[in-house]
């Protein structure tokens, strides 16, 4: 049988699968339509409820306006304004009580005069209170509706106030307190809401509690929910807070998931919620899902059976070909396919066998070439490794964050045996940098040091690394390159420490020269600003040094300078900095030393020089000025104070120490 017929049956199976999928999506569409219709139905009922409430309020307001338009009421109020008598009050009381319909919906009618005073009441209540005063203020210019609560805030009363005019003259206000029995009747008409649906009305009371005052299906009394019970009656809270018409899922006052249509009725500041349990809405959907599961199970079983039969009939030859092809691809290129048919599968089998023969020949040729290239590559790697290691400078390879490779000069300098040992203590050579102004730090201008150096090749980059108590200065260069879409950097560190020593050392005395002393003063100043590490300076001058040169010659003078330098080095600590300031002047920087310690050191040095026997001049003295750094003081100001102290020592007889205040 031709291969095209063997393909036909799998295609037929695919069609069956597609039909199953179409059925599935049709059922899903039906589920969505059911949900949509349920939501639209709830929304429609919510709008009807809102319209009925609005109609009821308008009808009630019209009745009150009709009551206020009675001629006898208006004329009696006008007479009361002119002359308030008991007779007139009695007439007003009679008018109010005669308006009682007897159906029990009107709880009270109150008449207020133009001063908000109660002058008549159906319930004979003439005690003024905040309620009547507030209603008067809001009703004297037009009709005003408001919900109030009785019986500890659980019984709602509709309060409507309206002004009374006689010939356009304001003569008083009438306030009607009306039970909301009719509103409750509207909400009890739960047609179309099923078993769990209901319509709710709620509002906020004066304590910001949510009051559900309409008849509740699952509660026998009015519910008052405090702000702490925020997880209950979520639809009503959303209706009162958002004041918009919307559909939302949430928990009702029973903590049961519902779908709700929410609306807000502004005239009475009430929320209107029409809700239905999600479980009830999902009942027909669940039935459909059960049917879908049954259909899916049947379809799955049929698919397994059909697939199994097709596999046995069609794929026997294909599996044989695949097994041999897989074996060849795994390296067993001497395997061959046995030809079973003369159709397309037979042609494919012949092609695979020819390919295997070609692979055998190619493999022999390729193996020889690989062997040759491997030898060449090993030789090239050996040459590169030798070049990398004989470079006199520290050379590093990094990905920008972690050190990947280093040459032998790096290990000679750091003392580590291999990269693994170094990475156990550091992640990058930048972790060894000394934080000095003007030198490289791990982060420079917001980027890593290696990226900064590679991007600014035109600049001179230096780094200081402290090791074994000494500082080593390096010139740093870096370049970047890409490999497998990954950026790498090659960095070269040239050790210029010895060159620096020559540049920073006074040739005669072997002490620091003026350039190095200036740099160390800057470091001490920065340390004081950042960490409050105090320091002092001692400026000293050899007394009558010009006379020594004039008397014995400059060579003897140079010898005196050398011996004084040795005395200074011998009497100072390792952390103290001693340098030739110029001519016969020397400067000592005493780190972490206050004025008392520096003064004591100056006295010690003075005595050492004074007691020293020079080879030709025999005895020689020095004068010293001492000063300690002060808050917000510059280096120049510090040196000026030390120089002034030295000048004072000279002027007061030499061979003495003067301390600056």
Image (cartoon, grey):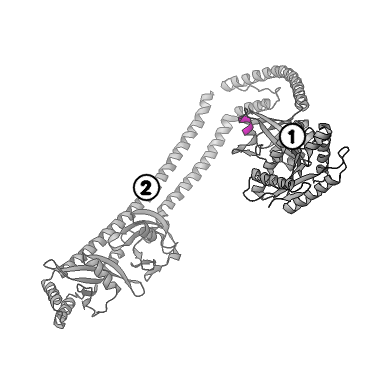
CA–CA distance in space, label 1 to label 2: 89 Å
Q: Quadrant of residue 257?
A: bottom left
In the foreground, 475 or 209: 475
Q: Secondary structure at mark 2?
A: helix
Residue 136: give x, y in percent of width and height.
Answer: 24, 70
Is residue 608 depicted above or below 249 in this figure?
above
Outermost residue toward the bottom in this view: 86
Q: Which of the 4 quarters of the picture holds residue 376?
A: top right
Q: Is residue 275 visible?
A: no
Q: Position of residue 162 (x, y in %)?
A: 20, 67
From what the image shows, is residue 280 above or below residue 645?
below
Image position of 625 (left or right of 37): right
Q: Which mark is residue 33?
A: 2
- Residue extent of the magenta highlight: 452-457
Numbered badge on residue 121: none
**If you read the primary sequence from the N terminus, does the residue marked by circle 1 or circle 2 appear first?**
2
Residue 253 vertical placement versus 537 (above, below) = below
Q: Quadrant of the N terminus?
A: top right
Whether residue 597 sits left or right of residue 139 in the image: it is right
In reply to whether residue 637 is colored magenta, the answer given is: no
Q: CB of mark 1 within 8 Å of CB of mark 2? A: no
Q: Magenta part mainly helix, strand or loop? A: helix
* Residue nearest the observer in this picture, 540 or 15: 540
Q: In the image, which is nearer the foreground, mark 1 or mark 2?
A: 1
Q: In the picture, residue 521 is in which quadrant?
A: top right
Of residues 6 and 631, the one nearer the viewer is: 631
Quickly name the residue at label 1. 504
Can residue 53 be seen here? The reply is: yes
């Amino acid at each position: 049988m031709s291969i095209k017929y063997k393909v036909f049956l799998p295609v037929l199976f695919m069609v069956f699968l597609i039909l199953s999928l179409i059925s599935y999506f049709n059922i899903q569409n039906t589920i969505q339509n059911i949900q949509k219709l349920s939501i639209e139905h709830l929304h429609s009922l919510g709008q009807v409820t809102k319209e009925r409430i609005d109609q009821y309020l308008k009808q009630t307001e019209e009745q009150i306006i009709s009551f206020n338009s009675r001629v006898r009421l208006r004329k009696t109020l006008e007479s009361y304004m002119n002359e308030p008598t008991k007779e007139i009050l009695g007439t007003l009381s009679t008018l109010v009580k005669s308006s009682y319909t007897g159906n029990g919906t009107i709880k009270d009618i109150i008449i207020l005069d133009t001063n908000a005073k109660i002058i008549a009441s159906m319930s004979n209540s003439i005690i003024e209170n905040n309620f009547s005063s507030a209603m008067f203020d809001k009703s004297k210019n037009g009709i005003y509706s408001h919900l109030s609560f009785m019986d500890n805030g659980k019984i709602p009363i509709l309060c409507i106030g309206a002004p009374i005019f006689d010939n356009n003259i304001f003569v008083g206000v009438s306030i009607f307190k009306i039970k909301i029995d009719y509103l409750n009747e509207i909400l009890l008409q739960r047609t179309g809401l099923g078993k769990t649906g209901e319509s709710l009305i709620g509002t906020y009371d004066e304590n910001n509690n949510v009051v559900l005052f309409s008849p509740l299906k699952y509660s026998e009394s009015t519910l008052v929910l405090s702000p702490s019970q925020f997880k209950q009656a979520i639809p009503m809270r959303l209706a009162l807070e958002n004041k918009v018409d919307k559909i939302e899922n949430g928990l009702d006052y029973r903590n049961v998931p519902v779908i709700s249509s929410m609306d807000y009725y502004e005239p009475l500041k009430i929320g209107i919620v029409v809700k239905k349990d999600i479980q009830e809405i999902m009942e027909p959907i669940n039935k459909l899902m059960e049917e879908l599961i049954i259909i899916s199970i049947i379809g799955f079983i049929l698919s397994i059976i059909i697939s199994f039969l097709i596999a046995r009939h069609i794929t026997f030859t294909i599996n044989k070909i695949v097994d041999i092809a897989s074996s060849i691809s795994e390296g067993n290129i001497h395997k061959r396919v046995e030809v079973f048919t003369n159709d397309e599968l037979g042609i494919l089998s012949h092609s695979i066998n020819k390919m295997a023969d070609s692979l055998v020949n190619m493999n022999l040729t390729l193996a020889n070439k690989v062997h040759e290239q491997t030898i060449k590559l090993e030789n090239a790697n050996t040459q590169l490794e030798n070049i990398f290691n004989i470079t006199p400078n520290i050379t590093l390879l990094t990905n920008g964050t972690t050190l990947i490779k280093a040459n032998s000069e790096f290990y000679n300098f750091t003392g580590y045996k291999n990269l693994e040992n170094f990475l156990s203590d550091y992640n990058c050579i930048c972790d060894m940098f000394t934080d000095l102004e003007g030198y490289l730090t791990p982060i420079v201008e917001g980027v890593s040091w290696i990226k900064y150096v590679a991007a600014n090749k035109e600049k001179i980059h230096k780094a200081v690394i402290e090791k074994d108590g000494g500082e080593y200065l390096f010139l740093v260069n870096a370049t970047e390159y890409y490999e497998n879409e990954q950026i790498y950097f090659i960095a070269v560190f040239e050790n210029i420490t010895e060159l620096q020593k020559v540049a920073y050392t006074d040739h005669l005395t072997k002490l620091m020269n003026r350039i190095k002393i200036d740099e160390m003063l800057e470091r001490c100043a920065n340390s004081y600003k950042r960490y409050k590490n105090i320091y002092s300076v001692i400026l000293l001058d050899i007394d009558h040094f010009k006379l020594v040169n004039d008397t014995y010659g400059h060579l003897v003078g140079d010898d005196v300078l050398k011996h004084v330098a040795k005395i200074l080095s011998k009497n100072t600590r390792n952390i103290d900095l001693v340098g030739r300031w110029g001519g016969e002047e020397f400067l000592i920087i005493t780190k972490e030393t206050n004025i008392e310690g520096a003064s004591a050191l100056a006295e010690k040095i003075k005595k050492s020089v004074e007691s020293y026997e020079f080879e030709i001049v025999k005895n020689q003295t020095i004068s010293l000025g001492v000063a300690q750094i002060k808050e917000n003081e510059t280096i120049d100001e510090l040196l000026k104070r030390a120089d002034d102290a030295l000048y004072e020592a000279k002027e007061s007889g030499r061979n003495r120490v003067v301390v600056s205040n």
